[in-house]
Amino acid sequence: MNNADSSTSTNGNPGAGRLRRACLLAAAIGALAASPAIAGPRLGTIEECLESGTDLVSLPGVPGGTLSARECTACATHRLTFDQKTRYFIGKEAVPYARLLDAANKGSKRIYVFYRPDTKALTRVRLVASAAGNK
């Protein structure tokens, strides 16, 4: 009667097959554990956005200086600065600041104010387009 041990490898070492499987399993677990460290740099916030209404955002007459914005009447006020790279949109259409200001002064509309959190510099201001015209 043959009682061959299943853990005996072909070279006659008992347990060599189990040892090999344990080493492979340990290597796989180690690789999976190390993968987040190898994945790359940590992600950071590049831009933040305030969703508000034109009644809670004070747009100056010309682009420059600061813009004050709140998300709600009880929320803290954010003071954000304009720079040469600030862009203005009505819907998806890029517009000059004067046109954005004119549209914002025609009643309460939703407005999105995007800024860099580290410098508080405005990157873009987007007014939601009305159904009667702007896209």
Image (cartoon, grey):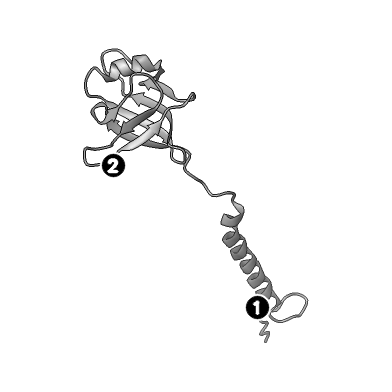
User: Up-down: is 12 above or below 21?
Assistant: below
The image quarter in which residue 132 lies: top left
Question: How far, Cα to Cα, is label 2 from label 1?
Answer: 71 Å
Residue count near mark 2 (Cα–Cα under 10 Å), binned few <14, some 14–19, many ≥20: few
Residue lying at 72% horizontally and 76% vertically, measured from the top left: 9
User: Up-down: is 7 above or below 110?
Assistant: below
Decide which of 81, 7 is in the foreground and name it.
Answer: 81
Residue lying at 32% horizontally and 18% vertically, measured from the top left: 101
Horizontal placement of 22 versus 42: left or right?
right
Residue count near mark 1 (Cα–Cα under 10 Å), binned few <14, some 14–19, many ≥20: few
Quarter holding the C terminus is: top left
Horizontal placement of 13 versus 7: left or right?
right
Residues marked 2 and 1 touching at CB (< 8 Å) = no
Question: What residue is shown with label 1?
Answer: 6
Task: Identify the secondary structure beneath mark 1.
Answer: loop
Horizontal placement of 94 versus 56: left or right?
right
Which numbered disc covers residue 76? 2
Quarter holding the N terminus is: bottom right
Q: Amino acid at mark 2?
A: Ala
User: Up-down: is 12 above or below 34?
Assistant: below
Decide which of 8, 77 is in the foreground and name it.
Answer: 77
- x and y percent of residue 102 in the render? 30, 15
